[in-house]
Image: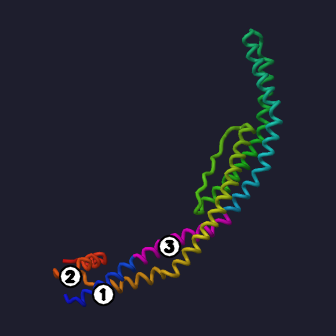
Amino acid sequence: MKPAELEHLVEVAERVERLERRLARAETLTTELAHDEEVVAAAPEVGAALERAGVALEPITRELEREWVDQGPLVTAWQRAFELEQIAEAAGVDPGPSIQDAEAARRQVESARLATRRQRELIDREREAMSRAVGRSPFDVDIPEGGADARPEAARREALALADVAQEAAHEVAEAGSAAAERAADARAELSGLGDPAALRRELDELRSRLPEEVTLGEDAPASAGVKLERAGVRVR
C-alpha cells in the first residue's frame, strides 16, 4: 500500500472514531432527554394529585381526633365493665349483670366505630388516588399501605403518615420536574451542536463504507496507523 493511500485510510479511520464518539454521546443525550421530557410533562399532574390528597386528608385527621376523644369514655366504660365481670367471677358472685354491662358497653364502642370505618374508607380513597397518579408516572413514591385497626387513634396515625408522604412527595416531584427541565434544556443545546443521531448514523455508515474490511501493512508503516485502523473496525495484518 502506498503511503498516500495509507494516509487517506488513516484519516478516514480517525473521522470514523470521532464520529462514533459523537454518535454515542448524541444517543445517550437523546435517551436522557426523552426521560427528562417525560418527567417534566408528568410533574404538574402528579404533584397536583399528591397535593390534593394531602389537603383532603386534613379534615379526615381532624374528624378522627374528635372521634378519638368522644370514644374515650365509651372504651373506658367497656374496660371497667369487663374488669367488674372478672372480679365477680373471681369472687364467686353471679357475673350476669356485669356481663350484660360489658356487652352493652362493647356494642356502644362498636357502634361509635362505624363512623371511624367511614373515615378509613375516605383515607383509602385518597391512598388509591395517590397510587393511581404515581403508578402511571416516572416517579417512584413509597405509599404506606392501609391498616385494619378499628380505633380512631390508629386511623388518625395512618392519615397523618399518608398526608406527610403526600406533602413531601409533592415537593420532591416539583423539584424533580424543575431539575429535569434544566437537564433537558442543556441536552437540547448540546444535541444541536452534535447533530441528529439518525443523521450521524448515516454519515458514520457512509464513512465506514470507505474503509476495507482488512488491510496488510508493510513493515515500514507507522504502528499508530494500525492502531487507528483497528479502532475503526479494520482488521490489520
Label 1's element?
loop
Q: Nearer the viewer, residue 94 or 178?
A: 178
Q: Mark 2 to mark 3: distance in Å? A: 38 Å
Q: Nearer the viewer, residue 100 or 213?
A: 213
Task: Tell me the kind of residue under disc 3.
Answer: Leu
Between disc 2 and disc 3, the foreground one is 2
Q: Are marks 2 and 1 in contact (CB under 8 Å)?
A: no
How many C-alpha atoms fall within 10 Å of the one at disc 2: few (<14), some, or many (≥20)?
A: some
Task: Tell me the kind of residue under disc 2.
Answer: Ala
Q: Check disc 1 and report the residue beneath it.
A: 210
Rendered image quadrant of residue 206: bottom left
Between disc 2 and disc 1, the foreground one is 2
Magenta region includes residue 177: no
Q: Check disc 2 and report the residue beneath it.
A: 221
Label 3's element?
helix
Q: Position of residue 223 (x, y in %)?
A: 23, 77
Prevailing SS of the magenta stretch: helix
Q: Quadrant of the C terminus?
A: bottom left
Q: Looking at the image, which residue sits at the far left?
A: 219
Range covered by the magenta-colored residues = 21-45
Q: Position of residue 199 (x, y in %)?
A: 44, 84
